[in-house]
Image: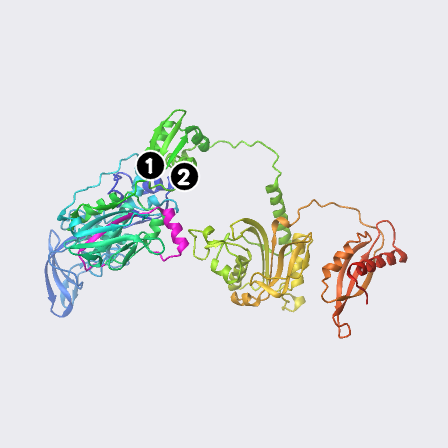
Amino acid sequence: MIITKSWLEEFIDISKISSDEICKTLNSIGLEVDSVENFSVAEKVVVGKVLEKVKHPDADKLNICQVDLGDRTVQIVCGAKNVDVDQFVPVATVGCDLGNNFIIKEAKLRGVESNGMICSSTELNLPKINDGILVLDNSIGELILGKELKEYSKLNDSLIEIGLTANRGDCLSIYGIARELSAYYNIPLLEIDKQINYNELGIGQVFEIECDSNIDSSLSFKAVDFSNFKLNLLYKFRTAIIGKYQDNNEIKNVLTYVTHSTGVILNAYSKEKTLKNNNLSILNIKKDEKGFDTVYGIESLSKICVEHNDIDQNDTDFIIEASYVNPELISKKVFENKVKTGEVYYKASRGSEPNIDFGIDYLSSLISKSGALIYRGSETFIEDKEKLTLDVSIKKVNSIIGQEISKIDIEKILVSLGFEVKDTIDNILVVKVPYYRHDIKNIADITEEIVRIIGIDNIISKPLQIDEVNRVNKTSNDLIKKNKLRFKAIENGFFETLTYVFSSKENLEKYKFKTVRDELDLINPIVKELNTFRTTILLNLVEACANNFKIGARSTAFFEIGTVFDENRQESKKISFIQTGSAELEDFSNAGKPKNIDFFSFAKKILNTIGKFDLEAMISIDNSFIHPYQNANVLIDGKVVGFISKLHPSVCEDYDLSDTFIAEIDFEAIKNDIIKTTSYSKFQSSKKDLSIITPKSLEYKEIKKAIDSLNDKNIKQFNLIDIYNDEKLGENESLTIRFVLQNDEKTMEEEDITTTMNSILKVLNEKLSIGLR
């Protein structure tokens, strides 16, 4: 939000308060100042008046002007197309330094003497208003010939840019900021001049507004004859300061100026674009096919508070519209329908000024002073709505603040901010929230307003009192588990990342991940690329790897523990891993050519991080990240809790990555048990290999389950070490399993080993009908 000190003074008398003090005040009341810029015209630039203009004898594009500077008349050669007799103009006199070593000197241009320069706005380091010289008028102050322009405060102003949070739409105007300063300094707002020059006709004699009863907007209309309208320099200058000045479109500029001044959204419709019925020009207001309030003439003219069409400057008679719509309603509707929005939507979706009569009256007064004529009367379509009422306990407010604030002070602050306050018994205030503060919902919001005006620095700090209680609960246990996992992941070569809980809906859908249902999704995304809640962390990790690749990192390994959402926006916590590129650093031992990471090396790192788990082949693949042939479900206690996979080659190609492996596991499923130590066997272990014939269709997990069912304490470990098949075996294959056998109380003899191995063969035969090769 851009303001200037002189612009604020249109609404509040702060002439005795410096710009620096205003900035400090804005910061203290929660309106953070981003930057301050001072506009200052150079010395020796004075007000002049063009007395005479003749063509240069030797140059078609130059004019010889005689310019009155009050105490003398000087001759200046000027090349501007718009210079003319009787104009008041800024003149840089001889010796003036306009900056960047641009010093005005006596000169001859094509043989004609020139003593000074008639300046454009940009040559004075002011915002650009046109392509020619700057023509002055009394809007900046009384024009006195020879007076230096640096003495005109409205041109030599302080521009202050404020970074507003999304909930403070009430401050998206000069009037809104003045209202805040009025509350802080206890200075009343100035009365706005309502003197208007009327046309002889009434609005109903020329225009007719037909409005459906089901519209959501509050609307007010006036008719204006702009035949003799001319926007003065000050309003052009201020519109240019905020970067919205349009040359040769004075109607658009004055609407922009008043909208920025008052916060009321304004629009104009040309008489030529209306429907005709005898002598009446008709506008229809009704909902379009998507439910938006829309203005129709001979065509659709605007989607109210969403997108406004360009204003045709060629016509002279216009219908002026002031509008307001509930920001929450319009934001939700735009999001649900994904419609195109214009510049006006930014202000409307954050909360424009709901007092639309104030805005249209301010405009009427301003333009009538500049030559426009206002048709008498107006058309309004405003639904009366009850203000939100809150019961505010003084005791509760002071409890939140941590300091005793008197009831009378609280009342004064709230009233100064525009709240209606009624005192009741038991120190309860009945507070009605002004329409322009749609962000105020509860007592905490009310308390924040009080603290803002008091000043956070004026709240006395107190020592924090802590009563120790048993704080061991699920949250603390999860934190301990999270820290253990973090340390383990870092030990295994992973770097921790922290990414947004938002993601790109388009990318999630592209790679076939589930997305949050539209009706539960974000209404106002922070940026286009983060327009939905993430349903996986992996997309963020892949993008992180790709960004590192762009800056030269050819091998990266990341992990993140964070929240994801399902289609119903239910939260869960996952731990996700990614590793791309080589498995180790370039070294003498690998001749500077390290091998890329492989599936089992990656899985081992995950195992070392989260603890024991089993793997099984994935039967169904539900996203495009998973490689069709290198993947596995992660099982803990026989339940699928995540997956490990190589990243699909097509995804690697999209992000310019080499061999990449990913994993995502349910955080809650990872065990956090206390590790119990037991004595290890002091007796020698034995290794025995068992080769068995099994059908190719039989999964190894069934064999493992059968062996585990023995609960034989002598079997310390067993692993599949070889798979063999040939034509003779047909639909069967040979599996070799290596067993580590060890007894805790004695050295196992051959008979003990044979007994254990026979029990293994027996259970395999009984449960799976398989045996020795």
Q: Secondary structure at mark 2?
A: loop
Horizontal and vertical percent position of residue 504:
48, 58
Horizontal and vertical percent position of residue 422:
34, 29
Q: Nearer the viewer, residue 575 or 233?
A: 575
Tell me, what colour scheme is on the image? rainbow
Q: Secondary structure at mark 1?
A: loop
- The three-letter amino acid code for the residue at tag 2 is Lys
The image quadrant of residue 269 is bottom left
In the rendered image, which residue does mark 1 sit on? 417
Q: Nearer the viewer, residue 42 or 225?
A: 225
The image quadrant of residue 658 is bottom right
Horizontal and vertical percent position of residue 259:
27, 49
* In the displayed structure image, the side of residue 722 where residue 195 appears, left or right: left
In the rendered structure, which segment of residues is drawn in magenta?
Answer: 312-341
Measuring 37% from the left and 37% from the top, which residue is drawn there? 388
Q: What residue occupies the far bottom of the structure in this picture? A: 727
* In the displayed structure image, the side of residue 242 where residue 746 appears, left or right: right
In the rendered image, which residue does mark 2 sit on? 441
- The three-letter amino acid code for the residue at tag 1 is Leu
Q: Nearer the viewer, residue 610 or 531?
A: 531
Horizontal and vertical percent position of residue 604:
67, 58
Q: Is residue 404 magenta?
A: no
Measuring 54% from the left and 65% from the top, which residue is drawn there? 651
Measuring 18% from the left and 47% from the top, which residue is drawn there? 141
* In the displayed structure image, the side of residue 600 where residue 393 appears, left or right: left
| Alpha carbon separation for disc pair 2 and 1 | 15 Å
Q: Is residue 42 visible?
A: no
